[in-house]
Image (cartoon, helix red, strand yellow):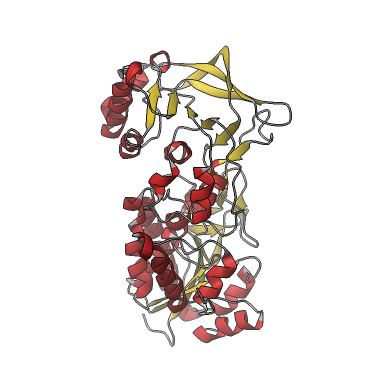
C-alpha cells in the first residue's frame, strides 16, 4: 500500500493491553506512527498498580513491556488525562485511528444490605493503595482484628494475603514506605474468605493458592463442613488440570491437624457461603452469610440457613468494572466500550470510523494479563483490514472516512504543541526513565530493586528533573 505519510494511530491507555496493541501494530506491514497516551505519570497500568508487590514473577512482565517502549518506534505521552486534557474529537484531528485500552479499575457493584457502612471496602481501592497508586489516599484504615473478604478469585487471595502477612516480610518488594507503615500497625489476626460456590468452582490459580500456604506465621484453615462436591464438580475436576490442582491443595489443608496451627495470624477459607448482609450500627460489626447447596451441575442455591460472623471490616473482591469515557459508546450493563471484535460501534451497531478498543475495557475484566495479547491481535487485525480495504470498511485511496488517512494535523509534533498550549505537563519516555532510575536508586541502599514513588507531584518533578532527592 502506498501513501504520502505514515498512518497515525493513538492508543489511550499504556497498560499491558495498550502496549501489546502498539507492539503488534508496529510489526504489521502498515507504515504506521504510534502514540501511546497514559493518564498517570508512569506506564504499565495493571502490572504496576494492580499486581500485589509480593508477586515479582508477575511483575517481570514489565521487563517485556519496557523493551517495547524503549525501542523508540512507539512514543509514550504520559500524564495526559483522556476526557480532561484531550477528548476524542481532539484526537481525531491528529490521528487516523484511535484505540482505547483504558482497562477496568473500579469495583463491580455488589447489591448487599449494609454495603455502604464504614468499614466496607472495595478490593480495587485497597489494591490501589498497597500498590502505591498516586490517585488514592496515602493512608488506609487498618484497624480491624477480624476481617471478611468476599470473592473466590485471585484478587480475593491477594487481599487476604496482604492483610494477613507481616509487613516486614514485604520489605524486599517495591512496597512504598507509607504502605509498609500502615500494614505494620495493623492489629489483624483473622481473615475470613467467603466463596458462594464449592471448592471445585473457585477461580483461584493453583500457584496463587499454594503460595498462600507459605506465608510465614500465617495458618490456612479450611473447614470440612464447607467441603462438598456434586456431579458438576467432579466433571470440572476431570476436565481441568488447574481445577484438579486447586482441589488437591484445598483437600490437603482440610487434613491439617488443628493442634499444629500455632501461627499468630490465620486465613480462613469458607466455601458454600454467600453474603446476605453486612451488619452494624454506624460501622461494620458482622457479616451474615447464607449457606448454599450445590445443585448437581456446579451451580448453587440458597438453603435459608444463615450464620453471622463477627468482623470489623469487609473487603469486596467480586470483580472489576469499566468506566465510561466521554464521546465513546458504552455498555452500562457489562461495563465495557460497545464494540464488535474490537471495532467500536454506536447504538445501532455501526462501526465508528477509525475507533477501536482492546483489553478489559473491550471484553470485561476476565483472564490473565497474557490473554490481552490475543485480544489485541484481534483488534489490530480489524484495524489493518479497515485501513487496507480488506475488511468491512476501508478504501483509503478514495478518501473513505472508514479507513485510510483522515487526520487534519498529522505531523507528530502537532499533538505535543496542542497539549503544551493547554498547559498539560506531559511526560515522554526519556523522562519516565528518570523516574524509573530514581525509584531504583531509592531501593538500592536497602537491597531492593526499587521503592515506588507515590505522590503524583513528586513523580512529575522527578521525571522533569526538578527533584533534589
Could you tell me if residue 359 is visible in this image? yes
**Which residue is at a point 63% across and 53% down the rendered structure image?**
347
**Which residue is at a point 68% across and 29% down the rendered structure image?**
114
Residue 258, quarter of picture: top left
Is 138 on the left-hand or right-hand side of 369? right
**Which residue is at a point 46% across and 61% down the rendered structure image?**
452
The one of 49 and 203 positioned closer to us in this rendering: 49
The one of 409 and 280 positioned closer to us in this rendering: 280
Say which quadrant the N terminus sits in: bottom left
Is 81 on the left-hand or right-hand side of 437? right
**Where 3 sits versus 199, above or below?**
below
Residue sitting at the far right: 282
Could you tell me if residue 401 is visible in this image? no
Residue 150 on image: x %, y %: 52, 31
Residue 146, quarter of picture: top right
The one of 372 and 227 positioned closer to us in this rendering: 227
Residue 229, quarter of picture: top left
How many numbered circles does the render carry? 0
Residue 228 on image: x %, y %: 38, 16
Residue 277 on image: x %, y %: 64, 24
Residue 301 on image: x %, y %: 52, 18
**Where 14 sits versus 215, above or below?**
below
Amino acid at each position: 500500500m502506498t501513501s504520502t505519510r505514515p498512518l497515525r494511530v493513538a492508543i489511550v491507555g499504556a497498560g499491558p493491553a495498550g502496549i501489546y496493541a502498539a507492539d503488534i501494530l508496529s510489526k504489521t506491514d502498515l507504515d504506521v506512527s504510534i502514540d501511546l497516551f497514559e493518564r498517570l505519570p508512569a506506564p504499565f497500568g495493571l502490572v504496576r498498580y494492580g499486581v500485589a508487590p509480593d508477586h515479582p514473577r508477575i511483575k517481570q512482565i514489565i521487563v517485556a513491556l519496557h523493551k517495547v517502549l524503549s525501542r523508540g518506534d512507539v512514543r509514550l505521552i504520559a500524564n495526559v488525562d483522556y476526557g480532561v486534557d484531550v477528548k476524542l474529537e481532539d484526537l481525531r484531528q491528529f490521528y487516523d485511528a484511535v484505540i482505547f485500552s483504558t482497562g477496568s479499575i473500579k469495583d463491580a457493584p455488589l447489591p448487599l444490605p449494609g454495603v455502604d457502612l464504614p468499614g466496607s471496602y472495595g478490593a480495587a481501592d485497597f489494591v490501589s493503595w498497597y500498590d502505591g497508586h498516586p490517585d488514592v489516599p496515602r493512608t488506609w484504615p487498618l484497624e480491624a482484628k477480624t476481617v471478611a473478604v468476599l470473592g473466590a478469585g485471585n484478587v480475593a487471595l491477594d487481599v487476604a494475603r496482604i492483610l494477613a502477612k507481616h509487613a516486614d516480610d514485604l520489605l524486599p518488594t517495591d512496597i512504598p514506605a507509607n504502605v509498609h507503615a500502615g500494614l505494620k500497625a495493623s492489629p489483624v489476626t483473622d481473615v475470613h474468605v467467603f466463596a458462594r460456590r464449592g471448592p471445585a468452582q473457585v477461580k483461584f490459580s493453583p500457584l496463587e493458592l499454594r503460595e498462600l500456604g507459605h506465608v510465614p506465621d500465617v495458618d490456612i484453615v479450611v473447614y470440612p463442613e464447607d467441603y462438598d462436591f456434586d456431579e458438576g464438580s467432579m466433571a470440572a475436576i476431570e476436565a481441568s488440570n488447574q481445577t484438579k490442582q486447586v482441589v488437591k491443595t484445598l483437600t490437603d489443608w482440610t487434613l491439617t491437624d488443628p493442634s499444629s496451627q500455632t501461627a499468630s495470624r490465620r486465613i480462613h477459607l469458607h466455601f458454600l457461603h454467600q453474603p446476605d448482609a453486612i451488619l452494624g450500627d454506624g460501622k461494620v460489626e458482622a457479616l451474615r452469610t447464607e449457606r448454599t447447596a450445590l445443585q448437581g451441575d456446579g451451580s448453587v442455591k440458597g438453603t435459608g440457613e444463615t450464620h453471622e460472623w463477627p468482623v470489623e471490616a469487609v473487603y469486596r473482591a467480586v470483580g472489576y468494572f469499566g468506566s465510561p469515557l466521554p464521546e465513546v459508546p458504552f455498555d452500562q450493563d457489562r461495563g465495557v466500550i460497545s464494540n464488535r471484535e474490537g471495532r467500536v460501534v454506536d447504538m445501532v451497531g455501526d462501526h465508528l470510523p477509525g475507533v477501536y478498543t482492546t483489553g478489559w475495557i473491550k471484553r470485561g475484566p476476565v483472564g490473565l494479563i497474557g490473554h490481552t495479547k490475543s485480544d489485541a491481535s484481534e483488534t489490530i487485525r480489524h484495524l489493518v483490514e479497515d485501513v487496507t480495504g480488506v475488511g468491512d470498511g476501508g478504501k483509503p485511496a478514495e478518501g473513505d472516512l472508514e479507513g485510510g488517512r483522515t487526520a487534519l494535523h498529522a505531523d507528530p509534533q502537532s499533538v505535543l504543541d496542542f497539549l503544551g498550549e493547554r498547559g498539560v505537563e506531559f511526560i515522554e519516555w526519556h523522562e519516565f526513565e528518570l523516574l524509573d532510575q530514581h525509584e531504583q536508586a531509592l531501593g538500592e541502599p536497602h537491597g531492593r530493586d526499587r521503592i515506588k514513588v507515590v505522590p503524583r507531584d513528586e513523580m512529575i518533578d522527578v521525571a522533569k528533573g526538578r527533584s533534589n532527592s
